[in-house]
Image (tube, rainbow, N blue to C red):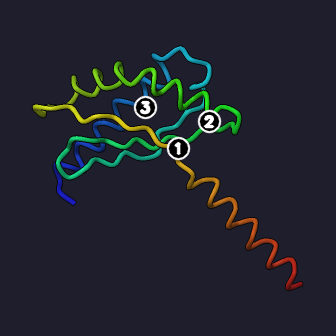
Amino acid sequence: MSVKKERIESIIKREVAPVINNRLNDPALKHANVTDVVVTNDLSFATIYVSFLEESQKEKGMEALERAKGLLRTEVSKALSTRRTPELIFKLDESIEYGNHIEELLAKIKKEEK
């Protein structure tokens, strides 16, 4: 991975997270966390992975992020020194749930062994 790509990913994450948590006054985004940002090699798309503390907020939170995409992209463009600002794509980060599921399975196996 190139240094430029890594730098752009970190800038996007650094700029988007506080805007989501502080400037967007949407209750659905109250417990939203930006977990990762992945930029395509041509820097035209940035996939932003988001997790929510409450299961019930996921759908409404993703809808709120889609509505705020323009504002978030504007904030990213101010921070980046590139000619074009990447298109923002929001995806739900399922890794936490997946990790919890694996832990539950391991605990069940361990319990069955005893």
Q: Which residue is mark 1?
A: 92
Q: Amino acid at mark 2?
A: Lys
- Residue 19: % across, % down: 42, 23
Q: Quadrant of the C terminus?
A: bottom right
Tell me if 101 is positioned left or right of 38 in this view: right
Closer to us: 14 or 98: 98
Q: Amino acid at mark 3?
A: Ala
The alpha-carbon separation of the residues under discs 2 and 3 comes to 16 Å
SS category of the residue bearing label 2: helix
- Residue 9: % across, % down: 29, 44
* Farthest bottom residue in view: 113
Say which label, 2 or 3, has the lower sequence index.
3
Q: Amino acid at mark 1?
A: Leu
Residue at 10%, 31% in the rendered image: 83
Residue at 34%, 21% in the rendered image: 70
Q: Which residue is mark 2?
A: 58
Q: Quadrant of residue 47?
A: top left
Q: Quadrant of the N terminus?
A: bottom left
Q: Are marks 1 and 3 in contact (CB under 8 Å)?
A: no
Q: Which residue is mark 3?
A: 17
Q: Are marks 1 and 2 in contact (CB under 8 Å)?
A: yes
SS category of the residue bearing label 3: helix
Q: Quadrant of residue 85?
A: top left
Tell me if 30 is positioned left or right of 89 in this view: right
